[in-house]
Amino acid sequence: MLSAGTDALADDGRAPRYKAIYQDLARGIRAGRYPVMTLLPTEHELCVQYDASRHTVREAIRLLTEAGMVSRRPGVGTRVEAAKSATRYTQRISQLSDLFQYIKNASLRVHDVRMIKVNARQAELLGCALRNEWLYVRAIKLLGAKSAPVAFSEAYVHPDYAAIQADIGRVHLPLSGLIETRYSQRISEVAQEFSATPIGKEMAELLKVAPKTAGLVITRRYFGEHSTPMLVTVTTFPHTKMKYSMSLKVDWPE
């Protein structure tokens, strides 16, 4: 059991107190001290147990919730949902550099790379004429090289930049980085769209989830100096493996 300490730091003086409490509770859940489908001690009981403030305990519970190990149930308490944390992306993006850092950190397992003639649906997505040729990339997104898949990705590269095909899988850069490096082009804008869809059978098998699992779809269009996108990506996450966070500030009139 974690011994008493200050709210600011854990006993080792390094980890924030709420993270130390989170880690101790997570260990307790994994060890069966708090079995699945039972309730954690109340906030007050945890405050006493860890000699911590209510705010600190709530932050620890928030981390457990984000990890998919517990859920808050108004009027009931905090229920244990899983004995281990779920693999999940959390994207906190407030500017373009944050997005590029996230993309750089992601890992792709490429399944298919080829030139295609776009169909009607793809032409609408890309804003181009029917049967135009684009470079098509189909891949699985990973949190790490050896981790379970977290998303299914389809990417379309404008034909002007299709020569990056030779670099895909050989050069450790995201597609946007390959375009910028090979062509000395700068991506200046990324337009994002969010939608939801049930995950089909083939994609579900690749992602190791049940068919018709709810999916979050993020479509990104990467622009340079022209109105036609250089790159379009469509990424589908199972709802249990994705959390998207953004912060919006109010611009009050002077």
Image: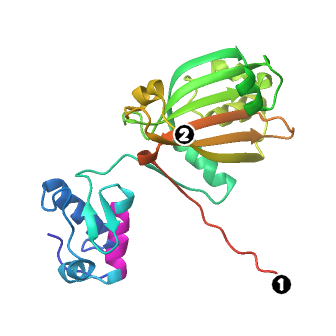
Tell whether 50 sits left or right of 148: left
Q: Give the crowd class for mark 2: few <14, some 14-19, many >=20 residues within 10 Å.
A: some
Q: Is residue 76 above or below residue 135?
A: below
**Residue 194 image position (x, y, % from top left):** 62, 47
Query: Which residue occupies the foreground of this view, 147 or 235?
Result: 235
Q: Main secondary structure of the magenta part?
A: helix
Foreground mark, 2 or 1, reads 2
Tell me the magenta residue range.
Answer: 55-64
**Residue 40 image position (x, y, % from top left):** 21, 68
Quadrant assignment, res 18 = bottom left
| Amino acid type of the residue tagged 2 in the rendering | Thr
Residue drawn at x 16%, y 62% is 34
Query: Which residue occupies the foreground of this view, 198 or 56?
Result: 198
* Residue 58 shown in magenta: yes
Quarter that holds the N terminus: bottom left
Q: Secondary structure at mark 1?
A: loop
Quadrant assignment, res 27 = bottom left
Residue drawn at x 69%, y 15% is 115
Quarter that holds the C terminus: bottom right
The residue at which mark 2 appears reads as 197
**Residue 167 image position (x, y, % from top left):** 62, 22
* Residue 123 shown in magenta: no
Q: Is residue 63 above or below residue 45?
A: above
- From mark 2 to mark 1, how far is it between C-alphas? 42 Å
Q: Is residue 170 above or below residue 83?
A: above
The residue at which mark 1 appears reads as 254
Q: Which mark is residue 182?
A: none
Q: Is residue 36 above or below residue 55?
A: above
Q: Is residue 14 visible?
A: no
The colour scheme applied to this rendered structure is rainbow
